[in-house]
Image: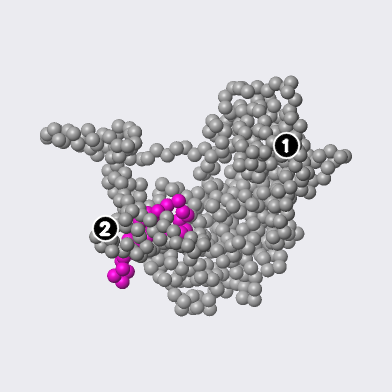
Amino acid sequence: MADNCSSVEIVEGCRLPVLRKNQEHEDEWPLAEILSLKEVSGRKLFYVHYIDFNKRLDEWVTADRLDMKKLQFPKKEAKTPTKNGLSGSRPSSPERPEREVVPVSEKKDTNNDTSLQKKQKRKEVVPLVTPVPPATPVPALPSSTETSQAAVFPVVREPPPFKAREDLEPIPTVTTNGTARRLIPPQPGRKRKANCGGPDEMIKVLQYNKPQSAAVFLPPPEDSQDSSDGIPTAPRMTGSLVSDRSHDDIITRMKNIECIELGRHRLKPWYFSPYPQELTTLPILYLCEFCLKYLKSLKCLQRHLTKCNLRHPPGNEIYRKGTISFFEIDGRKNKNYSQNLCLLAKCFLDHKTLYYDTDPFLFYVMTEYDSKGFHIVGYFSKEKESTEDYNVACILTLPPYQRRGYGKLLIEFSYELSKVEGKTGTPEKPLSDLGLLSYRSYWSQTILEILMDLKPDNGERPQITINEISEITSVKKEDVISTLQYLNLINYYKGQYILTLSEEIVDGHEKAMQKRHLRIDPKCLHFTPKDWSKRGKW
């Protein structure tokens, strides 16, 4: 397949299958897009992005891994920008219905009939700015029904009929019985309205894979901008550290650092990070593991270590239990460290943008202690003042420490801080794929832990409200209900919402908790929240 490369010229934007190894170390040929080309020692290398795969799998490949028989050249309406940020050619695809837009730079040409025809063709172009559909927020939850209660019953066999808003007064409450029994069917004499006002007035019932269970999406309040069908869509794209995807170009889409040496670990970055240009050509970028300063050679690092007095992150140690410690770092007082931390984190976070203005942020760095010092494991940052109730802006566990429970420990610590502050919190959206998995797992285990510990009162099934769950855990109400929906626990029975815990969910929760050895001990936390509304404390 490499022989065809000499006869066919591959350009940026081409798509073709590329050979790679999957998780089972088997050969596969996923479709990939060519983002860049370079020549090293007489060999052509191609930087490819595998379509429908995460960007962290992007890599430089040789020509022998390309399937030239299925080469697709870029269309005129190329979405991949060139290095100067402009489109490679004028979009003129006739397949899509287009608005009639005349470019401002178009000049009148009345020389002959052919120029007139060209002018008419120019009018059939796509607008220079591609319209982006507005992002719809996560569906909000009813506020007028938060104080009512309900009981827990076994799994519902059939989806309940639609209910009007008048019947939505109760809110989900919990009964913890691990057995599954058939529900008594609703009384036939009871009448329920099928159509009541607009679609926002109805409860949407979605059937999942198991026909015996149903999940109810509660209706959003009237001022919600959710879609009319009631199905939750992508989260809001607001937030202080959410990257603006409109500024993406070829440069930021490609990894620029080959390898990072941090202490006893060598890390292979996943994404682009704006380290100085002269450092991107080095085979290895060296970092001091205590102050995170970047250096270009091992000799420079050794010379730096003789001068660097730090053996732990700067700032206050606010938690220590065993070998695990947390340090609180003010982005204004320790600006160099904070900026270096952001540069390192950007190598493994694609959905966040990097700000050199770290003043509005606090950084909480988790470390592991040994005889040589406190070694960074991960961190999370948060705004000093958040109008959106965010308790996490960015969160990262470094790759050598992933899949060892440190991610959940970082999340648990962020909620412990929220408990001390007397607030409920939520992470800044959107979450990365790994971040979403970690948060969803933490929310599920935390909420199920509360439901399993409930005791029946006077022989009655135990009851709890969404507000009470939120206050106990400091998890925002929207996250509580979205987790209950994800676990498929919410059901509707006899005019009230109920939560059902099946034996399968209970057994799965108990097995997961047995594997979770790392937990935050609130007694070891020494933290006093500050009132950041007073500018003088910045």
Disc 2 or 1, which lies upstream in sequence? 2
Q: Residue at x 42, y 52 (%)?
A: 51
Residue designated by label 1: 498
Q: Is residue 48 magenta?
A: yes
Mark 1 Cα shell of 10 Å, populated few (<14), some (14-19), many (≥20):
many
Residue under numbered circle 2 = 9
Quarter occupied by residue 148: top right
Residue 123: x and y in percent read 26, 34
Residue 433 in the image, given as x and y percentages of width and height: 54, 52
CA separation in Å, label 2 and label 1: 63 Å
Which quarter shows the N terminus? bottom left
Q: In this view, does 482 lie above or below 19?
A: above
Vertical side of 129 occupied by 280: above or below: below
Is residue 372 inside the magenta stretch? no
Q: What element carries label 1?
A: strand
Q: Which of 359 and 192 is in front in this view?
A: 192
Prevalent SS, magenta region: strand
Residue 394 placement, left or right of 76: right
Q: In this view of the protein, can residue 264 be seen by the observer?
A: yes
The x and y percentages for residue 174 are 75, 40
Please state the extent of the stretch shown in magenta in the rendering.
31-58
Foreground residue among 130 and 244: 130
Three-letter amino acid code at the position of disc 1: Ile
